[in-house]
Image (tube, grey):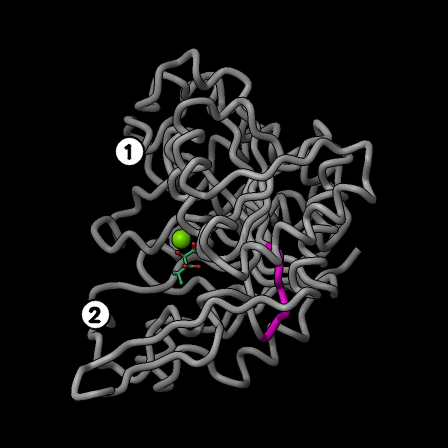
Amino acid sequence: MKFKITLLPGDGIGPEVVGEAVRVLETIASNYKHSFVFQERLMGGCSIDKYGSSLTDETLADCVASDSVLLGAVGGPKWDDPKAKDRPERGLLALRKGLGVFANLRPVKVHPALIDGSPLKPEKLQGVDILVIRELTGGLYFGFPKGRDVKDGRERAVDTLEYYDYEIKRIMKLAFDLAKGRKKKVTSVDKANVLESSRLWRQIATQMGKENPDIELEHVLVDTAAMKLITGPAWMDVVVTENMFGDILTDEASVLAGSMGMLPSASLGESTVGLYEPIHGSAPDIAGKGIANPVGTILSSAMMLRHSFKLEAEAAAIEKAVDETITAGARTADLGGKLTTRQMADEIIERL
Ligand code: IPM
Ligand code: MG
């Protein structure tokens, strides 16, 4: 089968890790007789430098017209001026909105061989296998009003946490659907003791729970969820939450996996065009050194094969190769090893 993939390597270590994921995908293409056609575009800080915009209309149109998008990372100190008109992160948010990818899947698994690398006690990490589903195109990131003004002689800043019922329903439906193929448990995370938007969130989750009696539903307040992620993560399966809670909880959850560099993500909407990216950032401190961990991006490309292209065997082959590579002791610097980005990818490709 033939697929067109838009690559948005972005900034910092983005180009390094995307380059290795492309090599993995090319190996899959040749092993399984597919054809992946890659087109590379600028997004983020690099796009600001070249075009004066973090995401141009043309680039967004090219992404929409392709079968899927693989992204590295965006941002860096160069574009951090709080007064700047555009920021790399704005491009990423506009891309998510423009592609309509409202559901961000962030699986967090702990490889047995990496348990010692986590700051948590090993017994807490046994059997951790969580799928966080983060709502991605609503909430504080996108609500209006938003901005700065002067009110009563005082400088004021406003962000709005807004959710419509349909936005909550569609992400809840996905959570329940995905829970059916897992441990049949959904943990809905909100702040219903304080926030109106969370009370609507909980109301819809409860309704969905009644419609899906085979799934165990529990509601957990976000502060408690943050604590339980550290004190008893194995108790969670599918976790569904709004945009910013999901942003924060998934960084926290990444600690369980030993390194942020390990974790992939898939952002999905109504269409099959998905956005796939590692959950780590652009890591400016190690950019250009060739030592970043490519696993998060490589596993993201596996998610692309599974969710957008329906190539389950190919996706599973990549995941198995990564698993075996870690078991064999291959480690980049973030995991306490010495392998370069390229060498780590070579180890994975050898096992495909
Ligand atoms: C993430 C990142 C982004 C987010 C930033 C870069 C805008 O932290 O993907 O988790 O907050 O969504
Ligand atoms: Mg984040």
User: Extreme left residue here?
Assistant: 153
Snapshot quadrant of residue 4: bottom right
Q: Specify few, some or many for label 1: CA neighbours under 10 Å numbering under 14, 14-19, or 20 or more.
A: few
- Give the residue at x 34% y 21%: 120
For the residues bearing labels 2 and 1, Cβ distance under 8 angstroms: no
Is residue 117 toward the left or the right of residue 126 in the image? left
Asked whether mark 1 lies closer than 8 Å to ligand 2, one says no
Which quarter of the figure is the N terminus placed in?
bottom right
Snapshot quadrant of residue 217: top right
The residue identified by callout 1 is: 333
The residue identified by callout 2 is: 78
Quadrant of ligand 1 in image: bottom left
The boundaries of the magenta stretch are: 98-103
Considering the numbered disc 1 on the image, is that residue within a helix, a strand or a loop? Answer: helix
313 or 201: which is nearer to us? Answer: 201
Amino acid at circle 1? Ala
**Residue 102 x, y percent position in the rendering:** 62, 62
In this orientation, does residue 257 appear?
A: no
